[in-house]
Amino acid sequence: MAESTYTCIICPRSCRIAVSGMPGALEVSGHSCKRGHDYALAEHTHPVRTLTTTVAVEGSPLRRLAVRGTAPVPRELLRDCLKQVNAARVAAPLRMGDVVLANVCGTGVDVVASRDVPAS
Ligand code: SF4
């Protein structure tokens, strides 16, 4: 397998980390600490992204609600997850942490409210 390089985003040092080799025998180089090693390995084998966006709210002075996933989602599904969440509508009132969309795109990740939403 060809070598891939990643810029570590764990700390401001931004090390350039290379991952090469075959699955089960991957080699990591260029990292300055174990956190960077683990980050690059995860990016190479199973990249995930944090899901944060907003949804439309009905029945409240608040028109859109900031929401977040309860866990990261696979990077290749992030766009589909955002589409599904952005198409959703929620009804007030809501409490911070309420599930506004369960199991988004079959990932097993729930999308929850980031704040309380009063009813109008
Ligand atoms: S490898 Fe370690 S030192 Fe380098 S950017 Fe990542 S966390 Fe920071």
Image (cartoon, rainbow, N blue to C red):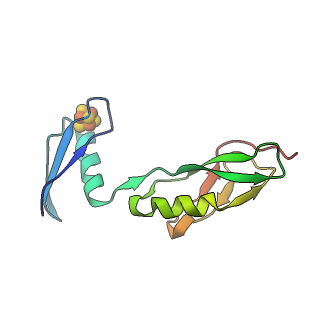
Q: In the image, what residue occupies the spot 71% across and 53% down?
A: 56
Q: Is residue 116 left or right of residue 67?
A: right
Q: Is residue 7 left or right of residue 49?
A: left
Residue 67 appears anywhere in the view: yes
Report x, y in % for residue 75: 40, 58
Q: Nearer the viewer, residue 24 or 44?
A: 44
Report x, y in % for residue 20: 13, 56
Residue 109 appears anywhere in the view: no
Q: In the image, what residue occupies the spot 25% across and 48% down?
A: 40
Residue positioned most to the top: 12
The answer to whether 80 is drawn above or below residue 37 in the figure is below
Report x, y in % for residue 39: 29, 46
Q: Quadrant of ligand 1?
A: top left
Residue positioned most to the right: 120
Q: Quadrant of residue 17?
A: top left
Report x, y in % for residue 35: 28, 40
